[in-house]
Structures are given as C-alpha cells and as structure tokens.
Image: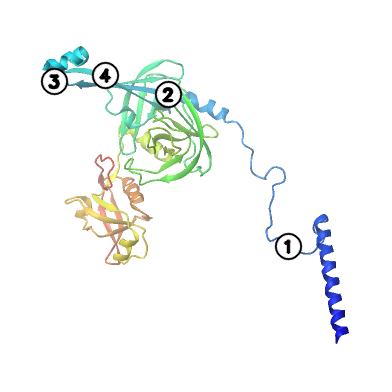
Amino acid sequence: MHKAWLIFAQCVAALVVVAAALLALNRFIPGLLPFDGAAVTIREVVGAHPGVAPPSSLAEAAARSRPSVVNIFTSKQVRVQRSPFMDDPVFRRFFGDQMPQQNRAQRVSNLGSGVIVSEDGFILTNHHVIEAADEIQVALPDGKTVAAEIVGTDPETDLAVLKVQRKGLPAILFAPPDGLRVGDLVLAIGNPFGVGQTVTMGIISALGRSHLGINTFESYIQTDAAINPGNSGGALVDSAGNLIGINTAIFSRSGGNLGIGFAIPVSIVRQVMEQIIQHGAVTRGWVGIEVQEITPEIAESFNLKSTEGALIAGVLRGGPADRAGIHPGDVLVGVGDKPVTDSSSLLNLIAALPPGKVAQLRLIREQAEMRVGVTVEKRPVMRKSAGE
C-alpha cells in the first residue's frame, strides 16, 4: 500500500513539472498549447480600418459654404421716457444733462446671421433676428451692405425669409434631408458677438430634439459646434459644405457656448421657406384641441396598453374637433394612416393637413378605438403653444 501511494505521488509531481514547463514554453511560443489561460480576447486594428476614411481638413467645406453666409444688422426705434425725477434739483445736480429732458426716440441695434438660398437675393434667417426691426441691412460676401426687405416670417419655427435687390449671389447647396447621422462632422458658420464671420467645428450630438419649449414646432439638430449670440440664422453645414440646418438657439446658463446648440433641420427649413416665398406666409392645419403627453401613470389610469398617442386635455368650443364630437379625455392614436407617437408628432401631423379637407382621426374612447372625420381649418398664429 505504501509503495502504491509513493508511485501516485511521483506521477503527480511529474505531471506538475511537465505542465509548468509547457506553460513557460507557451509564453515564448504563443499558440503552442490548444488552450490559453486568458479569458479576454482582444481585437486590434492592423493598418487602416476597412470602410473608415481617415479624418482630413474641412477647409474645402468651409470655403464652399462661407460665401453663402451673410451678416445681418437690424435696428428699431424705441422711445426713451423722461424721468419723473428730472424736476428734482438734487437729481439735476448729480446727473445734469445725462438724463433726457423730454421723451425722445432712440435707435437700438441688433446683429445676426443669414444664409443666401438663391442667386436672385433670397436669404434665410431666424424670425427673432429681424423681429420688430424697422431697418435691416445685409453685409454681402463682397463686402457691400444692402438694404433687405422681409418676404415673410414664421414665428412658430423661428424662420424668416429676406430679399435683397442683387443678382448672381453665391447660393448655398442643400443637403438631402434624410442623410444625417449622430456623430457626423458639422461646421457652424455665422457672426458670433459681431467679431466677423467665424467657422466652428463639432459633430451632430442628437437628432429630432423636441419638448424644449423654444418654439411650437421642434425637431432640432443638436450639435456641440460652438454657437454663440450672433450665430442665430447662420448655417450648419456637413463635411461637404452643404446646408443641413439653420442655427437658432443654445442651451446656456451664462449666455455663451456650453456645447449644446440647436439648428432647424433642412427638412423643416425647405417646407417653410418655399411656402413663404410662394405665399408670403405658412399655412398649417388646425382642429382646435389641446393635448398632453401620456405618462405611464396616465396610461394606467386610462387602462391603455402603451404610452403612445396624445391625450386630449381640452377642446375649443365651436372648433372643428368640438363640432366633430371629440371630447376631453379621448386619446388620439392616429391621423389618417399615420400613427401618433406623442404630442409633438401629433402637432406636426395635423399641421401638415390642408385646410378645408376632412381628416380621419383615430382615437380611443373608453378602451374602444373609433374614427372621427374632422374638417380641418387654417391654423391661427400661436407661438409656443401646445394647441392644435
């Protein structure tokens, strides 16, 4: 028995020595053993990654698009009220002629950017850049400044179209509306803080941003390309220099760039621009309802299967929806054959309906789906409203 245990111990010791020798040899000759003790497989790039082009200069894109971006200077006349303390001798002693002796008019200036969209003088910018202005001057790429007239504005998307009396202007090229991806390189071009035309670079951080409370119709491109005051109305272009959006707003606690800027995508820009040029204004559908998002709590209380759709919170008395028999508490899930995912999608779907036509709205009432025909009317101008 003692002899058998001695033989077993010698065999185990020999196996341990052989295993240690093989593992040591495998360090010098990888792959010698059919297995390896490592639990993680590392994938390394050898040479250029297939299908991925190395980054290059964006100078060509900037050179192609910069001539189409203009500076816009606006001014308006405001009345300065005479101080009621001007008759007080103490105030007159300390302030003297610095305070107005009587009510007088004063001009207040503002600046922004714009994008040339046609060779014959049409220029896109933001509504808030030219809002309430009684004089608009545009600094063209050739250095000349010319007066501009307002063709039309759309406060609900914050877009406006101007016209200058010039021919042969360098119009920008529009990118396809469905070719944008998160991570694409972009350039923001404008006149920040009035320092002169400036180009900043970033990427597309997100697409379809909404529920921001900036405008009524929102589906923004979010970018970290630096956008500052004065960039409003300027161009957001892709790496080929084609227009993908109009810079319109920033998220900032200080008033300067924090890496969160928003641009109106060309899909919206083209629709609004074409209607303004053709008709002087944008015509949208309207049915007279107030809607809100369906939260999980609302879905549970209404025994809904999901949070998709929009809850009708109010119906305008005598409006199209009221005449069609739609009630508060109904859940709108479709407009025609198009589904409603949330209140923003409903807003866009109804706005796209032509006034005067009957639209079929699909809604859920007391857990039963039904269709209601509503005669669409022209949407009145409403800024920052959830009403449809």
The residue singled out by tag 2 in the image is 70
Question: Are circles 1 and 4 on residues that touch, CB within 8 Å?
Answer: no
> What residue does disc 1 label?
37
Rendering quarter of residue 2: bottom right
Q: Earlier in the sequence, mark 4 or mark 3?
A: 3
The single residue placed furthest to the bottom in the displayed view is: 1
Q: Distance from label 4 to label 3 (Cα)? A: 24 Å
Q: Are marks 3 and 2 in contact (CB under 8 Å)?
A: no
Q: Gap between marks 2 and 1, in whole Å?
A: 64 Å
Q: On the picture, is 198 further left or further right than 290?
A: right
Q: CA distance from mark 4 to mark 2?
A: 22 Å
What amino acid type is highlighted by mark number 4? Arg
Give whichever of discs 3 and 2 has the lower sequence position.
Answer: 2
Circle nearer the viewer, 3 or 2? 3
How crowded is the residue under tag 4: few (<14 C-alpha within 10 Å), some, or many (20+)? few
Per the image, the residue denoted by label 4 is 107
Taking the spot 36% from the left edge, 65% from the top edge, the residue there is 305
From the top left corner, tell me how far across and down residue 175 is, in percent: 49, 36
Q: Residues within 10 Å of mark 3 (few under 14, many from 20)?
A: few
Q: Position of residue 347 (x, y in %)?
A: 32, 48
Residue in front for this viewpoint, 324 or 56: 56
What residue lies at 53% left-to-right and 28% top-to-bottom? Answer: 62
Q: Which residue is mark 3?
A: 85
**Disc 4 + disc 2, Cβ < 8 Å:** no
- Is 248 situated above or below 333? above
Q: Label 2's element?
A: strand
The amino acid sitting under disc 2 is Val
Q: Nearer the viewer, mark 4 or mark 2?
A: 4
